[in-house]
Image (cartoon, grey):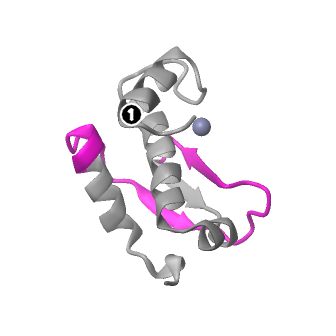
Amino acid sequence: MNITKIDLEKLYQSLNKKHFQGKLPYCTIRWYRKYTETVASIKESTRTIKLNPTYHTKRGINELKDTLLHEMIHLLLAENGKKEYHFHGKEFKKIAKRIGVKV
Ligand SMILES: [Zn+2]
C-alpha cells in the first residue's frame, strides 16, 4: 500500500471521532517531502500538520495514526487555550495516556 495515497482528511476525521468526540476543528494535513529528520509537525495557529512521507511509507498505517494522534493532542491543547500546547507537559501526557499514544 502506498501510504501517501491515503486520504489524510478522512483519517483525521475518523481519529477525531474515535478519540476526541469529533471536537477538533478542520485541519490542513499534507505530506512534506523536505522533511528528512523530522517525522511530523503541527502549526497550531494555522491548524496545519505536515508529515514526512519517507518515514511513514516505511513504517505503515499504525505509525501514521500514532503520529497524527500525537499532533492532534497538541491541537486540542491549543484549542482549549492551554499555554503549554506545543510541549509534552503534564496535560499532554495525560491525554496521550488516555488515548494510548506514545509521547
Ligand atoms: Zn509533540
Left or right of 98 in this view: 84: right
Left or right of 40 in this view: 7: left
Question: Within the magenta stretch, is there residue 34?
Answer: yes
> Measured along the vertical axis of the image, is residue 37 above or below residue 20?
below
Residue 85 in picture, x, y percent from top left: 52, 26
Residue 21, by quadrant, is: top left
> Measured along the vertical axis of the image, is residue 79 above or below residue 56?
above
- Name the foreground residue: 85 vs 5: 5
Quarter of image, ligand 1: top right
Residue 45 at least partly seen:
no
Looking at the image, which residue is at 51% across and 76% down?
Answer: 3
Mostly what secondary structure, the magenta segment?
A: loop
Question: Within the magenta stretch, is there residue 58?
Answer: no
Left or right of 29 in this view: 24: left
Amino acid carrying label 1: it is: Leu
Q: Quadrant of the C terminus?
A: top right
Looking at the image, which residue is at 43% across and 59% down?
Answer: 28
Residue 86 in picture, x, y percent from top left: 58, 30
Q: Which residues are magenta?
A: 17-46
Mark 1 crowd level (few <14, some 14–19, many ≥20, 10 Å Cα): some
> Measured along the vertical axis of the image, is residue 101 above or below residue 86?
below
Residue 60, by quadrant, is: bottom right
Residue with the mark numbered 1: 76
Looking at the image, which residue is at 39% across and 54% down?
Answer: 27
Residue 97 at least partly seen:
yes
Looking at the image, which residue is at 43% across and 43% down?
Answer: 72
Number of numbered markers: 1
Task: For mark 1, give the secondary structure.
Answer: helix
Residue 101 in picture, x, y percent from top left: 47, 39
> For the residue with label 1, is its CB less than 8 Å from the closest atom of ligand 1?
no
Residue 65 in picture, x, y percent from top left: 45, 56
